[in-house]
Image (spheres, rainbow, N blue to C red):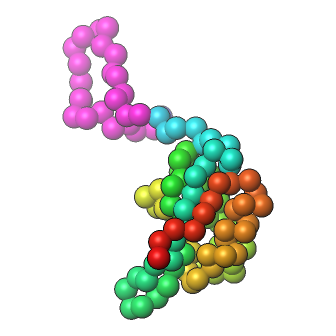
Amino acid sequence: MAKQNRSGIVYSTNPDFQYNDDSEEEATTPAPNQQELKVWLERKGGGKVVTAIRGWTGKTGDMEALAKQLKTLCGTGGTAKDREILIQGDFRDKILTWLLAKGYKAKKAGG
């Protein structure tokens, strides 16, 4: 049996006690044509350039799967966290073309 976070509840003497979990379930991932993604170019510490994809809505697992596909496409590393995908290097045009071909609503953003 998996442990659950019970917010400090250890034991109840009430035989009819039901624990109510207040955590929200993750939203389902909308279809690609309903995602509005923006592709940014940023400079991180040390002058390194990363391509950032923002605007993801849906499950974190689906975002991580998309990040893996993009990393494979570009042949580089990256990460997916906090509703943002970061790909090492300047791959804005390549990623934008791929996203549009897959049916995502995507556009360049930033200066």
Q: Is residue 72 visible?
A: no
Q: Which of 84 and 8 is in front in this view?
A: 84
In the rendered image of this protein, does residue 49 appear above or below residue 87? Answer: below
Residue at the location (70% across, 75% down)? 94
Q: Which residue lies furthest to the front in this view?
A: 111
* Residue drawn where x is 76% and y is 57% of the image: 102
Task: Using residue 7 as the reference point, say whether residue 77 is left or right of it.
Answer: right
Residue 17 on the magenta segment? yes
**Between 6 and 84, which is closer to the camera in this rendering?**
84
x and y percentages locating residue 97 in the rendered image: 72, 69
Give the extent of the magenta segment.
Answer: 2-24
Q: Does the magenta stretch include residue 75?
A: no
Identify which residue, 28 or 43, lies in the foreground: 43
Res. 108 image quadrant: bottom right
The image position of residue 31, as x and y in percent, is 68, 43
Q: In this view, does 55 lie to the left or right of 32?
A: left
Q: Which residue lies furthest to the right in this view?
A: 101
What is the chief secondary structure element of the magenta stretch?
Answer: loop
Quadrant hosting residue 43: bottom left
Q: In this view, does 68 lie to the left or right of 47?
A: right
Q: How many marks?
A: 0
Residue 111 location, x and y as percent? 47, 76
Compared to residue 61, the image places residue 80 above or below, namely: below
Q: Which residue is drawn at 67% across and 76% down?
A: 93
Residue closest to the far bottom: 46
Identity of the residue drawn at 52% across and 38% down: 27
Q: Where is residue 72 in the image (x, y as percent from the top left)?
A: 71, 73
Q: Name the side, left or right, on which 80 lies relative to 17.
A: right
User: Is residue 30 placed above or below 51 in the rendered structure?
Assistant: above
Quarter of the view holding residue 91: bottom right
State whether residue 40 appears in this view: yes
